[in-house]
Amino acid sequence: MSEEPKKDEGFIEKVKDTLSEIVEKAEDILEKIEHKAEDVWEATKNKAEDVWDATKDKVEEVWDKTKDKAEDVVDATKNKAENVWDATKGKAEDVADATKGKAEDVANATSDKVSSLKDAAEKTANPDEAKS
């Protein structure tokens, strides 16, 4: 019977050793998993930051282009309005000048007619003076 307890003790030692090795391997695996998880987390975080920076840059670029385009539209509209104003003002000046010229022509013709009528009336009123 003395052999059986020794056998049991040797078996128990082997089981303890095997379990210790399994625990060490499990700890190593766990440590590797933790390192891998940290690496994955860092890579994910870096990628997210890169995406955020790229998105922010693109938004700023689009904003700048939109702002520039809006300024171009405002400038073009302002120039067009100024051109319309200048053309309208020029046309109005042309119409005013033409109207003034026509009015002067009518005034001169009226004045000439009045003078002619006055002369004719004087000749009719004083027929003797008209002969001399």
Image (tube, grey):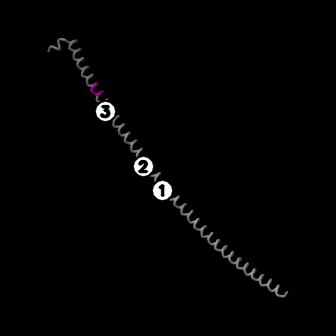
Q: Using residue 58 as the reference point, say whether residue 40 is left or right of it.
A: right
Q: Nearer the viewer, mark 2 or mark 3?
A: 2
Q: Is residue 43 above or below residue 25?
A: above
Range of the magenta residues? 102-106
SS at circle 1: helix
Residue appearing at x 48%, y 54% in the figure: 62
Q: Is residue 82 above or below residue 30?
A: above
- Amino acid of disc 2: Asp
Q: Which residue is mark 2?
A: 72
Q: Using residue 79 as the reference point, say whether residue 117 is left or right of it.
A: left
Our reading of the magenta stretch's main secondary structure is helix
Q: Position of residue 34 (x, y in %)?
A: 65, 71
- Amino acid of disc 1: Glu
Q: Report the quarter where the C terminus lies.
A: top left
Q: Which residue is mark 1?
A: 61
- Amino acid of disc 3: Asp
SS at circle 3: helix
Disc nearer the start of the sequence (2/3):
2
Residue appearing at x 35%, y 38% in the figure: 87
